[in-house]
Amino acid sequence: MTSKVTFEADKIDDPISHDTWLTQQVNTAFDRMENGLAVFVSNEEANAQMEDFKAKVRARNKNL
């Protein structure tokens, strides 16, 4: 996981790295969709997955 401090330092060194990464992610997503490999979930399922993820993060942070 990248910390905010590390990201800010990287941002100063290479200002287009995030844009390049984002472009690659979008292109990969469209390639997967065009090739039939994309998996779509309903809004309700996405919200449930996000709530599970948040609960895991909160539980992990309580142990610190």
Image: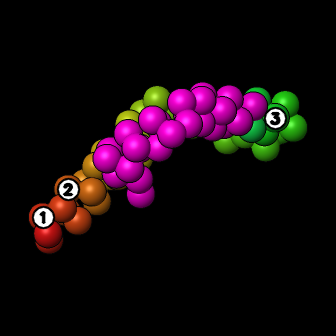
> Is residue 56 in sight in this rendering?
yes
Q: Is residue 17 magenta?
A: yes
The secondary structure that most of the magenta stretch takes on is helix
Label 3 SS: helix
Query: Crowding near pointer 3: few (<14 within 10 Å), some, many (20+)?
Result: few
- Would residue 54 appear left or right of 46 to someone viewing this image? left
Quarter of the rendering occupied by the N terminus? bottom left
Residue 54 at x, y percent in the picture: 28, 49
Query: Which segment is the magenta one?
Result: 1-27
Instruction: Say if mark 2 contacts mark 1, CB within 8 Å.
Output: yes
Nearest to the observer: residue 22 or residue 49: 22
Nearest to the observer: residue 22 or residue 6: 6
Q: Residue 9 falls in which quadrant of the image?
A: top left
List the residue tagged with mark 3.
31
Q: CA distance from mark 2 to mark 1?
A: 6 Å
List the residue tagged with mark 2.
58
Q: CA distance from mark 1 to mark 3?
A: 39 Å
- Would residue 37 appear left or right of 47 to someone viewing this image? right
Q: Amino acid at mark 3?
A: Asp
Instruction: Judge whether 58 appears above or below 10 on screen.
Output: below
Residue in the image at 32% along x and 45% along y: 4
Label 1 SS: helix
Quarter of the rendering occupied by the C terminus? bottom left
Residue 41 at x, y percent in the picture: 56, 37
Label 2 SS: helix
Residue 62 is marked as 1
Residue 35 is marked as none
